[in-house]
Amino acid sequence: MSPVATRALKGALIIPLTALLSWVLVAALPLRTEGEAKTETLRSLQAQLEADLGLGQPLGFLRPWEKLLAAERLGDGGRSYTGAELMRALLGSLRIGALALLLSLAGGLLYAWALSRTAGRWVAVGLRSLPPLIYALPTFVVALWVARSTGLAVDDTEAWQYEPIAAAVLALGPAAFVGAVLAGALEEEARRPYLLAARARGLSREQAWWRHALPNAARAVLDALPPLATSLLAGSFVVEKLFHLPYFGYLYLDAAQHRQLALVVVATTLFAALLVSVSLGTDLLRSWWDPRTAAAEDAR
Amino acid sequence: MNRLRFWIGAAVVGLLLVASWLYEPLAAWEALPACPFGPDPTFPATDTVCGRTLVGLRRSVAVGLFAGAAAAGLALFLSLLGRWGGAWIDGLIARGADLAFALPDVLILILIAFVVGLLRDAHPGFRPDALLVIILSLTVVGWAAPTRMIQRRLSTLASQDFIVAARALGASEPRVLLRHLLPFAWDYVLAIFLLRVPATILAESTVSFLGFGLPPREASLGTYLGLNAVSLLRSEWAVMVPALVLLFLLVIAFQWLGEGLLGRVQERRT
């Protein structure tokens, strides 16, 4: 079996493991408070929770997933969702995440290009100090400031129009990260003899940068994709809450705040699946982009 | 440059901490003028913006330092355990760290807050200290990256001649670890701890901002910003700006402190 397939298999195991562990954790928790047990309404909510989680049933941990596949509602009251609604929310988050990923890659590339073109020492020092300054700004601070500047009220029902702005806010930190990683990798590439040889054969500085240095340095960015996805996911909780975008991050916070246990189990598993998919996608992309990696792994 | 960054970072952190420690006693003796930013919007009768943000800063620093130290300590312990236990245990710890590192801090912190909230509701006697809970939660999420870094550092050190010589002279594995490897890893562990502090402060401020961190009465900078987020939307800058500036300065100062020290360690190595 190829190393990528082995890693894919190992990664895929994380998904059912997360589903099982999160269900076991939630099922082990006390679901009622002393006060809650007294009223009839809360007793029915309790029964709903137990039914959602499949407590006391054989293979109960599959129950939330069965309900979603059968188009039944998961959760209680106004906070219940069908499988299709959850998928719509997930797609909304993915849309923002994908746009943010593109923006952060473009921003990082622009930063690395600007740094490579900078001749002045102080301009370079200024540019180099940008990523640490951006890291020190929590996403929620930027999101708050942007929400205020765009006049977005927290309860704005037309908030979906703000998806591109939310993606831009989300992309700021990751763009600084990509920029710093790419700039570092390009500096290393610039010291290698093949680049000098390319220049000696008549390529301009710009041509050597785009055709030779960048494709080699881009491997470092590929390696950084999984942590980038993790960082985008963490940021999505904040921007979706602040821009009131009713997508998956928002839904997760709402489910955790309102004790929607079955939804927490399902959403945690889907998050794990998403991160595993990104990791697998990165592995495949790396093997295609840089055959040396695949060859080295085969040799190992 | 590394030395300069280290000292600037240390000076800023020191100044911020002194200001936060001195503010309350000086304000109690009425030795300070009234807070220029006005009363705190959440507790206007008892607190001012200055008092809440400076005390919040102290809590943020406490969370950062204790959780950072606990995470770095746990990482060091696991790395030493891995080296002592052999390749299989070392590999197992590395895989565990990779798995924990793959999940976002905020997601795990929300899950822990959710579990603690359920336990608190179910058992009226269960009232864990909020600060302790957040420090432990941040330790749970913060051990993975330092563990991988320390494992790599120990692995590099273990291949050096003086370690081979110690083994050849018959030193036992615990002796090699504690007497020969550890003294060379301390400064690296300290740098990792200092770099972990700003990351911890940022993670805590984010979960507190989302409402899963410290309670309003024991606010950190993140809780304070979360409680007063609407003030910024209403353009009430005076309520938010001090906390935003303090958070930014704190994170930058700790970053410089950690990067300065790490730079010095790497310079010495080369």
Image (cartoon, coloured by chain):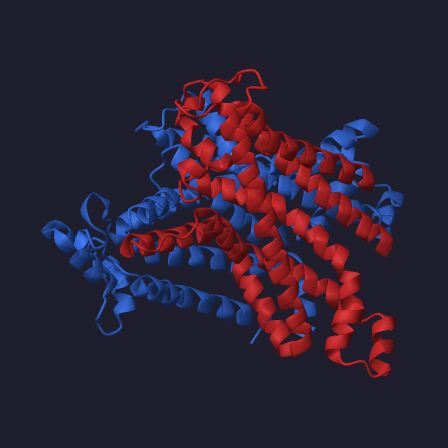
Question: What percent of the width, then of the height, locates residue A140?
Answer: 49, 35
In the image, what residue occupies the spot 35% across and 55% down? Answer: B126
Q: Is residue A217 above or below residue A131?
A: below
Q: Quadrant of the C terminus of chain A?
A: bottom right
Residue located 74% across and 62% down the image: B153
- The correct choice, above or below, for B77 with respect to B50 in the image is below
Chain B, chosen colour in render: red
Q: Can you tell which quarter of the image residue B85 is in?
A: bottom right
Q: Tell me if residue B89 can be seen.
A: yes
Left or right, residue A299 beside residue B268: left
- From this viewpoint, is residue A212 visible? no
Q: Residue furthest right?
A: A200
Q: Is residue A65 left or right of residue B185?
A: left
Image: B46 above or below A29: above
Say left or right for A105 vs A116: left
Q: Quadrant of the N terminus of chain A?
A: bottom right
Question: Which residue is rendered at x = 46% and y = 52% of the image?
Answer: B133
Total labels: the figure holds: 0
| Viewer-side residue, A296 vs B37 | B37
Q: Nearer the viewer, residue A75 or A158?
A: A75
**Going 23% across and 65% down the picture, which residue do you hit?**
A54
Q: Quadrant of residue B79?
A: bottom right
Q: Which chain is blue?
A: A
Q: In this rendered view, identify the residue nearer to me: A108 or B34.
A: B34
Residue A225 at what x, y percent from top left? 58, 51
Position of residue B204 measured from the top left corner of the image (x, y, whole percent): 51, 44
Quadrant of the rendered image containing residue A118? top right
